Amino acid sequence: MIAPEHFVEEAVSENVMAGNVMARRAGYQYGNILESGPKGKVTAALGVVLADGASGLPIPNKLIKKNWETVDIDGVNFEFFLTPHAEAPAEMVFFIRKWKALSMAEDLNHLQHNIYTLRGAKSRDANLWAHYLGEVIARWGDEVEVNFGPHTWPVWDNKNVIEYMKTQRDLYQSIYNTVLRYANYGYGPDEIAEEAKLPDPVSNSWYNRPYYGHLKNNLKATYILNLGWFDGNAAKLATYPDDARGKRYVEVMGGERKVVDAAFKSFNLGDYRFTVDLLNNIVAYNGGNTEANYLMADALEQLGYQEENALYRNLYLSCAYELRIGGNVPNDLSTISPEVVGALPPELLISYLSMAVDPKKALALGNLNINLVIKGEAKFGLELHNGVLNSVSDYQSKNPMATLEISKSDLLSLMTGKVELDKLVSGGKAKIGGDGEVLKKLRTIFDLNIKNNMNLVLPLQAENRIK
């Protein structure tokens, strides 16, 4: 398996460290919870549907670390070019000169891609994205006769390929340029998203249309990547979260009945955006007002039916579905399967376990220092301090309270409560030194049973809240 440098770290950051909430949002974004049909799921834009179920994590045995590196694969030379922080934090494209064949991975598609994906991930850099397309045109543009990729069909003939690439290059460059130009005039991200337009030849090219990436979303994301979420208005610093804000707005508007009546008027006028905005003030704190829930669902459905963008459509309709059934939508999508976590390199596994520490339990346990040896792979100095689990790789403390030598798979089983430490020791699968009770206590601080059915529109369920 050949992958770009930092592939594993970035894949884990997106799909494991933030994987529980990302997978939940992805189920709504791709319409996995919807029935197929004209009133439900039609497409996921880049493909028909995202596969449900658990994931795996194959670990590359060769990393591409420099541009224009050539690798012989079964007698065919592949020339690689790294494109990090464009469509993905770690990505590469390649050219097969023998066949004049170029694969642009997901940096080139028959649609506008996401600068920020609504399922949740790091924002992409539109300026870099355009730069990479330009670099490839300059390097391989005179030779290429076909472009192919993972999601869309090939483009044949040099003239067609180059025009395709240049128009997509212009799309991402114009997104970046437009945002920074408007921002320098004093526009904030919401104003830019609502008012800014790209040059007509760019936006009207059908393979730049916003079927997958929504232009408003991409403009906001580019602003935030370059200037952050804050637009300079200090009122935004004082904003309450949705539930507390909504409760206050409903109170000053005269109560829920008046808000629902006003929303009905907006709905009948066809102003579905304001209908949703009004009703969200109720729904954010009160999931039991079914009249508000159903009317908001009606308005979201109308927004979905009018959408050119597949992901906005799926999210509108998925959130409407949650409102109609009262929340607790089942979730069959997971990126944090035991296979994925078990495949993590040792450093990333320790990082994952650190993220999963319950600070209250850790504080109650006190400060600890432990030497950990993962058999045949790595060693760490672990320090639990102020409720935070820190680690230093390739290090062992001179005066540890306890030591543990164990395999990676057995460590994971121990920390998830699937096996007792004494059983691992008696079976010869683990060695301990110092105070063994410290190690038994350490396993109690991990919160690895996070639910994945969290509401995304209605108030977060009581059983999903951190105690």
Image (cartoon, rainbow, N blue to C red):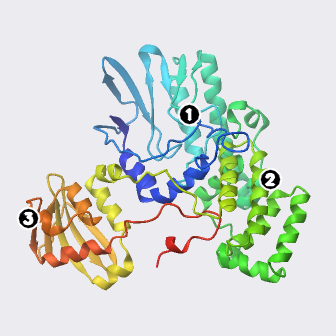
User: Is residue 85 among the parts visible in the rendering?
Assistant: yes
Task: Tell me which residue sits at (31%, 23%) in the image.
Answer: 72
The one nearer the camera, 16 or 90, is 16
Q: In this view, does 285 lie to the left or right of 415?
A: right
- Mark 3: few, some, or many residues within 10 Å (few <14, many ≥20)? few
Front in this rendered view, residue 137 or 396: 396
Q: Which of 225 and 295 is in front in this view?
A: 295
- Residue at mark 3: 426
Q: Do the residues labelled 1 and 2 touch (CB within 8 Å)?
A: no
Residue situated in front as seen by the camera: 168 or 389: 389
Q: Which of marks 2 and 3 is in front?
A: 3
Above or below, 253 against 92 in this view is: below
Q: Quadrant of residue 163?
A: top right
Mark 1 to mark 3 CA distance (whole Å): 58 Å
Which of the marked residues, 1 or 3, is nearer the chain's N terminus?
Answer: 1
Q: Name the residue under label 1.
A: 133
Q: Mark 2 and mark 3 in contact? Answer it, CB < 8 Å.
A: no
Which of disc 3 and disc 2 is earlier in sequence? 2
Q: Residue 12 carries which label?
A: none
Where residue 314 sits in the image (x, y, percent)? 66, 48
Q: In this view, does 348 lie above or below 308?
A: below
| Residue drawn at 79 percent across, 57 percent down | 299
Quarter of the image with the N terminus in it: top left
Q: Position of residue 123 (x, y in %)?
A: 55, 52
Q: Mark 2 sits on what residue?
A: 195
**Alpha-carbon neighbours of circle 2 within 10 Å: few (<14), some, or many (≥20)?**
few
Res 400 seen here: no
Amino acid residing under circle 2: Glu
Distance CA(mark 2)–CA(mark 3): 68 Å
Q: What residue type is labelled 3?
A: Ser
Q: Position of residue 136 (x, y in %)?
A: 52, 29
Please state the horizontal and vertical placement of residue 121, each as a whole percent of the image. Answer: 52, 54
